[in-house]
């Protein structure tokens, strides 16, 4: 027996009372009528009561129940009385089960609470709370590092070696790409102005000083904040969700010594090395642009020798040490203080990157001002 196509018919028996007659086989192999058409017809008729009846209904399944559930939701929203007593008993029971619990409606945030978040006093309290939390984390980290120096910390060298590999060799690809491009960008920017003075040769000086003092370390730190800082937050946040940090604490092991210290030390060791690597590739990138301007390799290397200075290199390396500590603190603190759940882990990773970038910008500006005042 061939199944009949499902259909419905609206019959108006009494004023404001509409009968919805279902017919055909409401099964998976048949095209189900679009509920939007029924909704349009009901809007035009504006009934006070809708009676659903079984006229020539054949086989039915979940598709008919989904159609009826849409009818129920529409009638409930429009204040229309829905009568389903003429349906098969099984369909009535399924519809009762599906509608016994009302759908969850997320409460709207009161306007007063949203305005409260913009209150300067509230913002000051939130900022002070964050500062206290950061200082407490920094204090715990200082205690853990002191215990490490005294040889009493629960820090494993194997973890330190693993995180060094994660933060160092695994980051070569992205650091190489960004460093070469940054060197080329510096050379292009300098060439635009220097060409007007006929001093294109000094592009080499601009690239070398810019990479050693500023762009090499800053771009490397930004990449590591998005790569390693977020990874630290995600790792520790997942451990917090799985209650692994609670288990470590229960066993009498400090999470700060066991989890945070090796990550911080690994980044402190690897970021200066990555900075030197980035400086070298940035200078090579600048040389590519200089070659396109007609500057020979001999001229470029000669200018590099004159511009190279241990002072410029030490400025960049000192920044790398500070940036490494800030990135590690931002990532580990966000992970350790993460909530429990997948959403909380994602928020922790996002917070780690944003916080690290803010730290980097503020620290870079402060260090540059300090070096300018002391004449370095």
Image (cartoon, grey):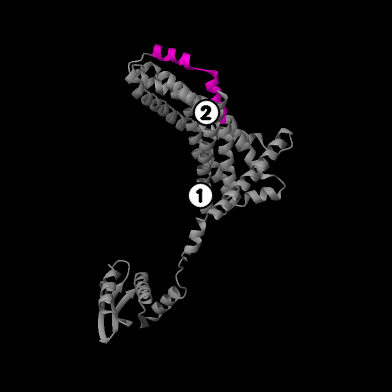
Q: Secondary structure at mark 2?
A: helix
Query: Residue 23: image x %, image y %?
Result: 28, 77
Verify whether residue 206 appears in magenta.
Answer: no
Verify whether residue 299 appears in magenta.
Answer: yes
Closer-to-camera residue (212/50): 212
Which residue is labeled 2 in the image?
Answer: 274
Query: Residue 365: image x %, image y %?
Result: 52, 34
Residue 71, above or below 301:
below
Left or right of 87 on screen, residue 358: right
Magenta residues (range): 297-320
Report whether residue 154 is seen: no
Left or right of 331 on screen, residue 28: left
Which residue is labeled 1 in the image?
Answer: 346
Cα–Cα span, label 2 and label 1: 27 Å
Closer-to-camera residue (236/157): 236
Query: Residue 150: image x %, image y %?
Result: 74, 34
Q: Secondary structure at mark 1?
A: helix
Residue 155, above or below 47:
above
Left or right of 53 on screen, residue 279: right
Specify the label residue 273 is tagged with: none
């Amino acid at each position: 027996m061939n199944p009949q196509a499902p259909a419905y018919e609206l019959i108006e028996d009494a004023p404001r009372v509409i009968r919805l007659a279902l017919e055909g086989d409401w099964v998976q192999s048949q095209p189900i009528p679009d509920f939007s058409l029924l909704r349009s017809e009901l809007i035009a008729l504006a009934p006070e009561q809708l009676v659903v009846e079984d006229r020539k209904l054949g086989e039915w399944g979940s598709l008919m129940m989904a159609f009826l559930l849409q009818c129920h939701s529409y009638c409930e929203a429009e204040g229309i009385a829905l009568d389903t007593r003429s349906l098969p008993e099984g369909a009535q029971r399924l519809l009762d089960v599906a509608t016994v619990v009302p759908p969850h409606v997320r409460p709207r945030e009161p306007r007063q609470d949203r305005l409260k978040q913009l209150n300067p006093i509230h913002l000051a309290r939130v900022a002070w709370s964050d500062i206290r939390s950061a200082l407490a984390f920094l204090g715990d980290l200082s205690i853990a590092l002191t215990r490490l120096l005294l040889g009493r910390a629960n820090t494993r060298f194997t973890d330190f070696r693993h995180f060094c590999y994660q933060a160092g060799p695994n980051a070569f690809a992205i650091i190489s790409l960004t460093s070469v491009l940054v060197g080329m960008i510096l050379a292009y920017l300098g060439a635009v102005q220097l060409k007007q003075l006929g001093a294109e040769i000094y592009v080499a000086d601009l690239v070398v000083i810019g990479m050693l003092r500023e762009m090499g370390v800053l771009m490397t730190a930004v990449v590591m904040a998005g790569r390693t800082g977020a990874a630290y937050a995600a790792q520790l946040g997942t451990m917090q969700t799985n209650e692994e940090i609670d288990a470590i604490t229960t066993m009498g092991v400090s999470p700060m010594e066991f989890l945070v210290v090796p990550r911080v030390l690994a980044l402190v060791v690897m970021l200066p090395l990555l900075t030197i690597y980035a400086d070298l590739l940035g200078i090579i990138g600048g040389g590519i642009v200089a070659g396109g301007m007609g500057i020979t390799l001999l001229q470029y290397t000669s200018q590099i020798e004159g511009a190279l200075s241990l002072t410029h290199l030490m400025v960049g390396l000192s920044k790398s040490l500070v940036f490494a500590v800030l990135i590690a603190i931002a990532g580990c603190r966000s992970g350790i203080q993460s909530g429990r759940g997948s959403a909380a882990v994602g928020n922790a990773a996002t917070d780690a990157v944003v916080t690290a970038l803010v730290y980097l910008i503020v620290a870079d500006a402060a260090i540059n001002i300090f070096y300018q005042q002391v004449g370095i």
